[in-house]
Amino acid sequence: MASNPTDNSQQRPRHRNGPPPPRRQGRNPPPPQPRYQPQQHQSTTTTATAHTPQEKKKPVFVKVDQLKPGTSGHTLTVKVVSQTSVPQKPNAASSSSHLRPNRISECLIGDETASILFTARNDQVELMKPGATVNLRNAKIDMFKGSMRLAVDKWGRIEVTEPVEMVVKEDNNLSLVEYELVNVEE
């Protein structure tokens, strides 16, 4: 049967100027689309600055004693006190032979206010040598067995800086504090 442009019994109507026709809901329905409101231009100065790149904010350095569970985006300068390599399970490395083995090391880091355990992964292990002073950018707090660990993922950065005379307060180790998740009912 040839397609006949005058035969509309088999064709769906086209919406040229309106929204697209609704999609059928299958096994995995599409996520709801956000509805954006058109922006109203208030003045010409706002449109001129919209095309220029945004200015970067200056990093706000925090101290180790200000870290809280479940937070992220921290920038801090710390000194590495010690480093301990974490042995990997042999079963995990042999099951995926095409992947390189992960190197994980736990480092005690801190500043003059407190100390905390830092989890260094792969290339981060070489940077976290005892006695080194490092800047941690976009660091996050991970919870491990109820205690806090500091980590830097792929969105963060570790920079080795020039050594700073800093006496690390090791007796205030935030990783020794055990937390418990409590559900609060209102």
Image (spheres, rainbow, N blue to C red):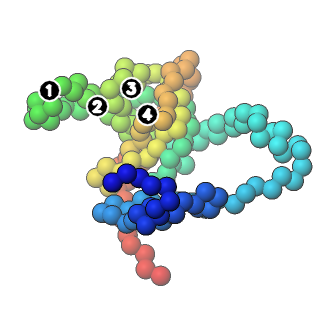
Amino acid at pointer 2: Ile
Amino acid at pointer 1: Ser
Give me the residue at 35% from left, 36% from top. Answer: 119
Q: Which residue is mark 2?
A: 104
- Measured in 3D between alpha carbons, the distance from the residue under mark 3 to the one under mark 4, in whole angstroms, is 11 Å
- Lower sequence index among marks 3 and 1: 1
Give percent across and percent down for residue 106.
32, 34
Viewer-side residue, 180 vs 5 = 5
Which mark is in front, 4 or 1? Answer: 1
- Lower sequence index among marks 3 and 4: 3
Q: Check disc 4 and report its element: helix, strand or loop.
A: loop
Q: Which residue is mark 4?
A: 154
Give percent across and percent down for residue 118.
39, 37
Residue 61 in view here:
yes
Amino acid at pointer 3: Gln
Q: Which residue is mark 3?
A: 124
Q: Check disc 3 and report its element: helix, strand or loop.
A: helix
Q: Check disc 2 and report its element: helix, strand or loop.
A: strand
